[in-house]
């Protein structure tokens, strides 16, 4: 049971306060891939996962493919060019785990709270992510070298 | 809603067949850390996550600290020495995302199915993981360079 749902059983007021930052789940892991078709074959063929969405995010310089894993997701990221964040990641480290994204209830409130705490962010305001979500990345210096994203989904996909 | 639960609504027989391999959720992400106290401070202090378990796994050469994130977990891994898998990972790549673990209902059945499909494994039989779970790692050549673990928990922690 998530902290938010637990809090809701306490009182709506407490729930609202707690849900400003609380991560309700791992929304997804992002995986940088050089060969998108081969990576889809692993996730569909070997793991039996289902592709639920495919989108080109020009602003982030990636083609993204999303799979369901229960209430979580796997996001494959193919760079649109070498001079993109994922393109540079691939050149430096090769294919592999790229980031983790935690789901939040209210990303604007979460960012305000992080700002108040002096946490360094890549995005000081939410921007549009995959499937119309609102997302923001923490700066790696604030997240122990793990590229970390906050996601407020447009719709909670189950 | 997970595939297993969806399947259970279809028929118990179908549920059993589907659950042999289906990944019911992301069980956890594993993060390699050099400074465990600093990483705990990020996850507790910045993210507001709760430490739920701490264990030294001599066989895997790590001290592990587990946090709840809704029904998922974050696992911090501090190597017990330089000549351990996580010690070598840190020396080569530095701190960061180390592996992803998917939860399965029946790990023995899942491994049988993977063997039948000719999927290369690091572990051909389950071994004991954190909190008495049964775990097995796929070989990186079979998982697109993402170190991937299957986990059958001793108890489903919610």
Image (tube, coloured by chain):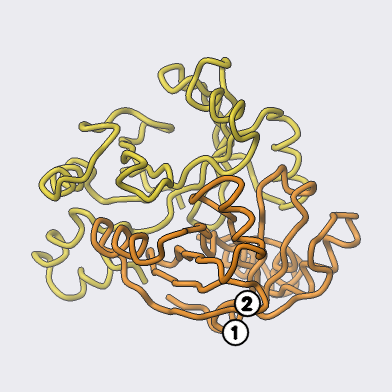
Chain colours: A orange, B yellow
The answer to whether A68 appears left or right of B125 in the picture is right
Q: Which residue is mark 1?
A: A132
Task: Identify the residue at image location x=72%, y=73%.
Answer: A107
List x then y, in percent, for residue A9. 60, 68
Numbered disc 1: secondary structure = helix
Q: Quadrant of residue A158?
A: bottom left
**Residue sitting at the far front:** A82
Label 1: chain? A
Task: Identify the residue at image location x=59%, y=63%.
Answer: A24
Label 2: chain? A
The answer to whether B106 appears left or right of A23 in the picture is left
Q: Which residue is mark 2?
A: A129
Question: Can you say which quadrant of the picture contains the N terminus of chain B?
Answer: bottom left
List x then y, in percent, for residue A92. 61, 46
List x then y, in percent, for residue B126. 25, 33
Q: Would you place residue A97 above or below residue A17 in this image?
A: above
Numbered disc 2: secondary structure = loop
């Amino acid at each position: 049971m998530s902290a938010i749902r637990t809090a809701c059983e306490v009182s709506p007021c407490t729930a609202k306060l707690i849900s400003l930052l609380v991560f309700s789940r791992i929304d997804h892991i992002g995986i940088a891939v050089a060969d998108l078709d081969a990576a889809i074959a692993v996730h569909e063929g070997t793991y039996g996962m289902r592709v639920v969405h495919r989108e080109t995010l020009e602003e982030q310089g990636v083609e993204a493919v999303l799979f369901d894993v229960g209430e979580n997701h796997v996001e494959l990221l193919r760079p649109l060019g070498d001079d993109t964040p994922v393109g540079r990641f691939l050149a430096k480290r090769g294919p592999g785990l790229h980031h983790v994204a935690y789901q939040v209830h209210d990303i604007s409130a979460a960012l305000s709270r992080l700002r108040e705490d002096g946490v360094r962010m890549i995005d000081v305001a939410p921007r549009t992510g995959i499937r119309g979500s609102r997302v923001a990345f923490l700066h790696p210096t604030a997240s122990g070298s793990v590229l970390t994203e906050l996601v407020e989904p447009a719709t909670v996909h189950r």
